[in-house]
Image: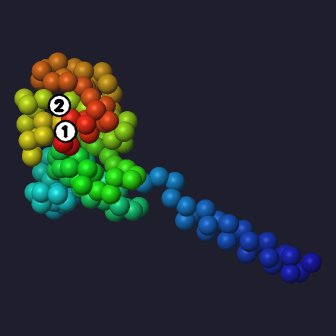
Amino acid sequence: MRVQQLFQPFLFAILLWGTACISSSLEPVEIYPEDMCSRCKMAISDKRFAGEIMVDAGVARKFDDLGCLLKDLKAGPGSQQPAAFAVDFGNREWVNVNEAYYVQSPAIVTPMGSGVIAFKERSEAEKTAARYGGRVLNFEELVATVAQ
């Protein structure tokens, strides 16, 4: 009986530790003024155009332009897309690249000239596309057109 009483808290601690080690999903990390693009090595001076590919929890490859992020994804192994995030151009909050809507237009000036910005809401993307004479794309369409 005494052994069972000692064993139960030990088992509970192991279960807690094991569930804490399971990564539910990778989250984006903050961009700091000293951060540079992992691809082109330019300073990430305007977060509205930024993106990240998560390497591990709390560790990201950061990009100053969504075009750099797309090129990096294309150059990768390709078997499984890593967790990646783009900044919503309007509210500067992170959105998963697969859930975002993108506006592509030559009239949009981005750090590396991709002309691509991201939005969480389709309605915002549509308004911006109308203003810049651009088109709204989902991530799959964006990869097919931009990362060639």
State the residue position of label 2: 104
Residue 77, x across and y down, in percent: 32, 57
Any part of residue 118 in sight: no
Question: Which quarter of the figure is the C terminus placed in?
Answer: top left
The answer to whether residue 136 is above or below residue 8 is: above
Residue 14, x across and y down, in percent: 67, 71
Q: Is residue 60 left or right of residue 4?
A: left
Q: Is residue 27 left or right of residue 137?
A: right
Report the disc number at residue 73: none
Please give the name of the residue rendered at 32% of the width and 25% of the height, measured from the top-left corner: 122
Estimate the spatial distance between the alpha carbons at disc 1 and disc 2, rounded to whole Å: 9 Å
> Residue 26, located in which quarter of the rendered image?
bottom left
Residue 138, x across and y down, in percent: 31, 31
Q: Is residue 49 left or right of residue 76?
A: left
Q: Which comes sooner in the sequence, label 1 or label 2? A: 2
Furthest residue toward bottom: 3
State the residue position of label 1: 146
Mark 2: few/some/many CA within 10 Å (<14, 14-19, 20+):
many
Please give the name of the residue rendered at 21% of the width and 30% of the height, measured from the top-left corner: 103
